[in-house]
Image (tube, rainbow, N blue to C red):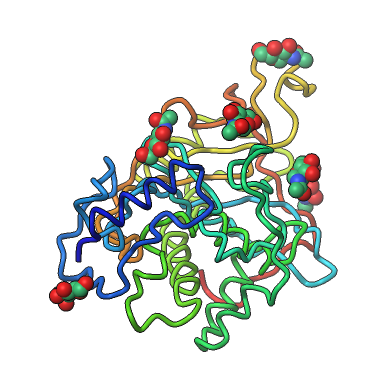
Amino acid sequence: MRVTDQKIAGALLLLSGGAFAQLYPGQSSLNHTCLLQKPLLSCPPQDPTAVDSCCVETFGGLLLSTQFWDTYTGREAEGQLLPTDTWSLHGLWPDFCNGSYTQYCDLTRQYDPIPSPNTTTGTKNGTFVPPYTGPNIGTFLEPFGKIDLLEYMNTYWVAQNQDNPGFWGHEFSKHATCFSTFNTPCYGPKYQKHEEVVDFFETAIKYYKRVPTYKWLKKASITPSNSTTYTYSKIRDVLKKEHGAIPFIGCSGPRYNTTEAGKGSTDNGFTSFSEVWYYDYVYGRPQEGDTVPVDASASYQTNCAKTKNAIHYYKRTKGSEKKPSVPY
Ligand SMILES: *[C@@H]1O[C@H](CO)[C@@H](O)[C@H](O)[C@H]1NC(C)=O
Ligand SMILES: *[C@@H]1O[C@H](CO)[C@@H](O)[C@H](O)[C@H]1NC(C)=O
Ligand SMILES: *[C@@H]1O[C@H](CO)[C@@H](O)[C@H](O)[C@H]1NC(C)=O
Ligand SMILES: *[C@@H]1O[C@H](CO)[C@@H](O)[C@H](O)[C@H]1NC(C)=O
Ligand SMILES: *[C@@H]1O[C@H](CO)[C@@H](O)[C@H](O)[C@H]1NC(C)=O
Ligand SMILES: *[C@@H]1O[C@H](CO)[C@@H](O)[C@H](O)[C@H]1NC(C)=O
């Protein structure tokens, strides 16, 4: 079913006005039976006046499946621990095909207790994103009986310095509300409240399961160590081979040339390996997962130091992890 031109024009107007409303306020709730349609590729961007934006990711067609390597959670005392021998899930983000992005696209679905940034644009004059104070987003899964999903999320989608559901709420409201395909009208006339939240969590996990970073690196003998160091290009080549495209490889910690090892170097990349973002285009709805791996933008493939053996891939702090109770 095509969305009418008039409705799209309204949506675009709102968007270009620095909108705080959803991307597609005019989407029809009548029918979006996407299986009846040809699954179109999400990038280059589809003409929003010519497609059903519930059936192809129309603005945010460059998908990022993102993961963390944290060494602690800051909430060990509460039993919030990282899964052993596994990178944890960060999120699934809809970037525009050109690499830029929007955030907090629908403030009627604001479930993030600590909005970051605190405005829709990240600038002082953007629309303020009010902190969410209602029941945490994890409780939304209960009416759907998704207890196994909740257990999976508590095992692999682990927050740092925040409770897990607060972080899931952040990921949903900051990023998922910007997908055209997870918009509520896409669920048709039988939409049940929060159905798209469950759908988004399941989809983010579907993508996460396909990119087992820890396992891939381990196969190439790249494992956490507090004595060995690693080289950016080696990590990149392994992940490129496994995923089929170059991901963004993120580091934190001190800059190389501020460390003892990097003294005198001009390499000011960061040295503590902490993130990977895998990029894909997708045919049809992201939920179906018919993806095409793509390289991270040539201008931003890493912020890590590139000098040989400059990167630490630290072992986690003792007591910050536990053996997963459910399989990856
Ligand atoms: C979808 O809904 C529209 C009303 O907006 C209706 O005209 C059309 O026949 C429906 N299409 C299908 C395939 O059911
Ligand atoms: C990227 O694409 C979006 C959506 O089409 C557009 O709004 C934005 O202006 C573009 N940004 C750049 C830097 O071209
Ligand atoms: C948003 O965050 C900035 C930076 O932390 C802060 O200065 C500002 O007061 C916050 N705005 C609101 C409305 O809370
Ligand atoms: C909002 O602030 C940004 C920089 O923080 C500036 O570039 C932009 O022009 C401002 N917009 C308005 C409407 O004042
Ligand atoms: C680190 O490298 C950057 C860029 O090459 C340089 O601007 C900076 O001065 C260096 N810092 C130190 C402490 O050497
Ligand atoms: C390894 O080093 C990191 C960074 O200094 C530290 O946080 C972590 O606790 C260490 N892990 C072990 C097992 O020593």
Percent coordinates x, y for residue 228 in the rendering: 68, 37
Image vertical order of residue 140 relative to residue 143, above or below: above
Image vertical order of residue 221 relative to residue 261, above or below: below
* 72 horizontally vs 57: left or right: right
Quadrant assignment, res 269:
top right
Front residue of this view, candidates 314 and 34: 34
Q: Residue at x 73, y 69 (%)?
A: 133
Regarding ligand 3, which quadrant of the image does it lie in?
top right
Front residue of this view, candidates 12 and 123: 12
Image vertical order of residue 106 relative to residue 306, above or below: below
Q: Residue at x 46, y 67 (%)?
A: 200
Percent coordinates x, y for residue 253 in the rendering: 73, 35
Q: Residue at x 78, y 72 (%)?
A: 79
Percent coordinates x, y for residue 36 in the rendering: 15, 70
Q: Residue at x 62, y 70 (%)?
A: 155
Residue 204 makes an appearance in the image: yes
Image vertical order of residue 270 relative to residue 131, above or below: above
* 261 horizontally vs 157: left or right: right
Percent coordinates x, y for residue 187 in the rendering: 35, 74
